[in-house]
Amino acid sequence: MSHRDPSSSLADRSPSLLLARRNLSRNRLRSGLAVLGIVVGVFAIAALGILGTVLELTAADSLGGLGNQVIVSPNADVGSETVSPRDVQQIERIAEGAEVVPLVTGGAVAERGESRTFVTLYGTEEPASLFVAADGELPERHARGAIVGSDVAADLGVGVGRTLTIEGAEYRIVAVLEPQEGISPVSSDNAVILPPAAFVEEEYTQVIVQADSGAEAARIADGIREQLNARDERVDVFELSSIIDQIGDFFDLLSAFLLAIGSISLFVAGVSILNVMLMSTSERREEIGVFRAVGIQKRDVMRMILVEAALLGVVGGVFGVVLAVVGTAALYVFVAEVTLSAVVAVQNGLYLLGAFAFGVVVSLASGLYPAWKAANERPVDAIRGG
């Protein structure tokens, strides 16, 4: 029983690949530099594309559910200073099924002994709809006591069960809020939340509507504009989803710009491969002439040279993708704000595949002219070297 050499078996199956490998190994430095150009180009496209996606998704995570919120406030341009209880009832009918939280806002100095600090005051009966407690419990219906932000508690040295004084009135603290993360229509760190009865005003200065989705928030905002502003522009209606959309548009533009930069580096690598292929075919001119003289077809010569170019692209593409994966993993490990969901997003996989495919395509395109030139030269002229 005879045993065939694995290398000869591979040569039988793909002689063009082995011939391309041999030809490229003739000048390892030149081939290596061409591969390096593809590595840099593929890495640049993949890494910059992934960076844009990570930035966008990380920003979206930090914004949380802002896109589902609608803020209604009096329109000062027409002399409106408050939102009436009747307006709030109308908003509740329009936003049926969504949370509607009317607020009274203001500012004052909070005191505890010799310590004092300026705070933002919020008056609401439903603090649990907007805030999260780090210590104590938020009442379902806020009727007495004060809820303080983390900065206020630190500045005054107070906690749950202690008291603070605001404008001569003493309030017992029922909860301390968690430090604020991300962006919110209400600033909680330097806030004190009181029952609405603690305020002189009987009308509200702001209404926050928390919908289930951005589309629902848009519907509610349109309804409020149509009904409350039917005669006069009495209220300003602001959809926070508009900010999210603008941020998304910005990151789309940023990603396109970053990809354009990466593509330039890959085209430069393509020029390098074109030069390598031209020099390689020029050095092997007589060899290619002999191939043609003994009956090798033009398409076989073109295939041989294009396989060489493709091999450079595949090797460079693989290394470029690996470097991009390593760089993305390092971003996740060393940057605390970057989340795992942003790193493993489907878009990132598409960037890796797209960058690899683009690298191979650029390599093949760069090998087309040298392949055509070598295949179409007369065998006699190639052998003579003239």
Image (spheres, helix red, strand yellow):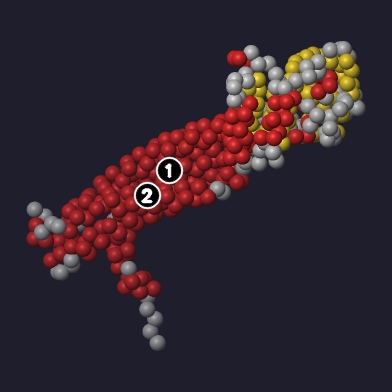
Residue 195 visible in this rendered orientation of the protein = yes
Q: Is residue 379 left or right of residue 6?
A: left
Tell me: residue 245, above or below residue 378.
Answer: above
* Residue 75 rendering spot, x and y as whole percentages: 62, 18
Say the numbered circle drawn on residue 359: 2
Q: Is residue 115 left or right of residue 311?
A: right
User: Within 10 angstroms of label 1, few (less than 14), some, or many (20 or more) residues?
Assistant: many
Q: Residue at x 70, y 26 (%)?
A: 87
User: Within 10 angstroms of label 2, few (less than 14), some, or many (20 or more) residues?
Assistant: many
Say the numbered circle drawn on residue 45: 1
Q: Residue at x 75, y 32 (%)?
A: 131
Tell me: residue 109, above or below residue 161.
Answer: above
Amino acid type, residue under disc 2 in the picture = Gly
Residue 319 visible in this rendered orientation of the protein = no
* Residue 50 rendering spot, x and y as whole percentages: 50, 43
The residue tagged with tag 1: helix, strand or loop? helix
Q: Is residue 19 left or right of residue 330?
A: left
Question: Pointer 1 and pointer 2: residues touching (CB < 8 Å)?
Answer: yes
Tell me: residue 60, above or below residue 184.
Answer: below
* Residue 79 rendering spot, x and y as whole percentages: 64, 13
Q: Residue at x 87, y 12 (%)?
A: 168
